[in-house]
Amino acid sequence: MLETVGLSKTFKEKKAVDGIDMYLDVGESVGLLGPNGAGKSTTISMIASLMKPTSGDVLLNGKSTIKNPADIRKVLGVVPQEIALYEELSAYENLKFFGKIYQVKKAELESRIQEVLDLVGLAERQKDLVKTFSGGMKRRVNIAAALLHHPKIIILDEPTVGIDPQSRNHILETVRRLNVEQGTTVLYTSHYMEEVEQLCDRVYIMDHGKIVASGTQSELFSILSSEDTLQVQFSKISENFLEAIRAIEHVRRVEETGDGVRIISKKGSNMLSELVHAAERHHIQVIHFQQEVPSLEDVFLHLTGKTLRD
Amino acid sequence: MKAVMLAQFWKDKRAPFIILLFMAISILLTVIFGDAERIDQTTVAIFSSESEEIEEFWEQRLNESSDIEFVIKDEEEAREGVIHGTSDAAVHVMEDDFLLIASSNKPSIQMIEQEVHQVFLEEAQLQAVAGSGNMDELRTEVQEYMKNPPIEVETKSLEGGAIADYDMGIQLLFGFTLFASMFTIGFKVNGITIDKASGVWNRMILSPVSKTSMYMGHLIYSFLVGFFQILMVLLIYEFLMGYDLGNFLMIVTIAAVFALSMVSVAMLIAGFVKSPEQFYMILPSILPIIPVVSGVYMMPGTITNPVLQFIGDIFPLSHAVEAMVDVTLFQANWNDILLPIVFMLLIGVVAMGIGINMVERRR
C-alpha cells in the first residue's frame, strides 16, 4: 500500500534521514522505533508530503506521492507530536474547523464529530475550551482531529509524550481499536518500546537516520537468538561452584549479580539438569531460576549499543 | 478559506479585548494630543511683576494680531493655572522681554512662544526705528502706511478660495487612528506564524484547502479586523465627537487601502521572524518608529532629511495620513488622492510578495 524507497533528507550537510526503505500493508500496524533525534519525525513528514526528500520516493499503491501529494493527503490522517489545535476554542469547535477544512460534508460533519469524540472518550467535555484540558486530553483531541475524514492510513508521531498513564492507556486503546476494529493502517512512532510491542505487528528500528533493523517482533528478537540468558538464585555461592558452572558445556559466560548468578549459554542448549547436578555436588540449593525474555529495548541495545532513552 | 477566517473569528469572539483596547487607545491619544493642538480655543494668562501699564500694553499688542486670546491675570493665579494643567502656558511680560511659563513641552507651547516672540520682535524693531522719537506717532504712521501698502500679497487655494488653516489636531486624529490599527493588523497576521508553530498550518496543508486559501483566510481576516477598527473609530469621531472629516467615503476608501497595505507590511515582518514570540517582540519595537519617521506627529515640512523622508515614504502611514488630511482640510477630490493610494497599493504588493516568499522559505 505505502512504500518508501531510498528516502533521504539532508539539512545543511547533516543527513537526518539516510536511504530509508520501508513499507506498510493494508490494515497493518507498524511501529517506527528510535531514540530522540533518530529521524523519525523527518521520515514521517516526508511520507505525509509535508517535506520534500533530498532523494528517494514515497509510493502509494505504486504511484509517487512526491509528484502527486494530493493522492496521499486524501487517505492520510496525521497526528503530529505537537498539540496542533486552537487552544482558545472548544474541542467541538476545533473538530468543526478541521472537519470543514477536510471538506467533510455538512450533513455528515456533526455525526462524525460525535463519533470521533466518543472514540477518544471526550464527548462529555466537547464544549470545554482546549486550554482547560490536561495534556492527555489535548492529545486525545489531537488524535480525534486527524480522524474526521475517515483516513485509511493514520500516522501517529509520539502521541503519548508527556502524559499521565491513564490517558496513555486510553490513547493506546484508541489506536488498537482503529487498527483492529476499523481496519485503519497505522504507522506508530515512539521511543517507548513497550507501546510499540503492545500495538505493532511489525517494527522498524531507526538510529542516526537509518533503519538498523526491521521485522516482526519475533524476527527482531531472533537477532539476539544466539544466546539464552538464565538468572539463577542459589542458597550460597563459592568460587569453586562458579568454576563448575563455567565448565558446563555450552556455557559462554557466568556473571555474579547482586541476587544470584547470570548464566549466558548457547541458544537451545539444555544445561539446566547439569546445573542442578553441579549444585548438588557442591551441596548448594537452587532457590529460584528464570529464563530472561528479550525485549525490543534489548534488541535496540544490541544493535546500537545504547538504550532508547539515551 | 471561509473556514480559516471563521476559526479566527471564533477565537476573537472569545477575546475581543485587544481590538477594543486599541480602539480606545486611538481615541484617547487623539483626545489628549489632538485637543492640545487646538489652542485657538484656549486663553493664555499674562502678568507683570513690574507695573499694570506694562501688562495692559502687551495685552493690547499681543491680542492685535494673534488667534490666541491673552488675558491679564494675577501672577499667582496664572502660575496655579499652569501647575494644575487648566492652561498650557502663561506669559510673564517685562518692559522689553518676556518669560514663558509652561509645565510640559506640548506642541501648543511652541506656537504660543512663536506668537509672543513675533510681537516682541516687531515692537523692538519699531523702537529701534523710532530711536529717541515719539513711539506712538511712529506706530500710527506705520499703521496708516500699511492701510495702503506698496505691495500686497494675497494667498488663495488652488480652487481660488481661501486657504484653510492647517489643523494639526486632524492630522493627529488620523495618525493615531491608523497607528493603533497597525498593532491590531500586525497581531492578527501573526496568526499565520502561530499556526505554523503549533502545527495547525501543517494540518491545513494536509487538507484539501489550498495554500492560497490558507493565506487568504488569514490575511483577509486581518484586513477586515483592522479596517473595522479604523471605521468604528472614524464613525465615533464623525458622529459622536462632532469632528467634520469631510468626504467620509473618500476617508473610508483611504482607510481600506491603508489596512490592505499594512497587512502586507505585517506579512513582511512575519517573513523575518522565526517564531510568534519574536513577532510579538519585534512588532511593538518597529511600529512606534513608523509615525515618527513618517512625520505624523509633526507639521508638514518639518522633516527635511531626504533619508528620513525616504524611510517614511516606504511605509503606508505617511501616504494615508497625507491623503486623509487633504480630504478633510483641503477638500481633495478622487484625483488628488490617487497618487497616495497607488503608493500604498505598490507598497502592499511588494511587501506581500517578499513576505510570503520569506515565510515559505522559512518552512
Image (cartoon, coloured by chain):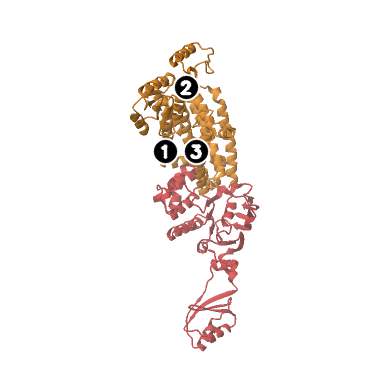
Chain colours: A red, B orange
Residue A136 quadrant? bottom left
List the residue tagged with mark 2.
Answer: B124
3 or 2: tag closer to the N-terminus: 2
CB within 8 Å, label 3 to label 1: no
Q: Position of residue B89 (x, y in %)?
A: 40, 29
Q: Of the residues shown, which amino acid type is indicated by label 3?
A: Pro
Q: Earlier in the sequence, mark 3 or mark 1?
A: 1
Rendered image quadrant of residue B241: top left
Looking at the picture, how far across and down is residue A16, in whole percent?
61, 56
Q: Are marks 2 and 1 on the same chain?
A: yes
Q: Can you tell which mark lies on residue B21? A: 1
Q: How many discs mark residues in the rendered view? A: 3
Please, is residue B26 above or below residue A153 in the view? above
Q: Secondary structure at mark 2?
A: helix
In the rendered structure, which amino acid carries the disc numbered 2?
Ala
| Callout 3 and callout 2 share a chain | yes
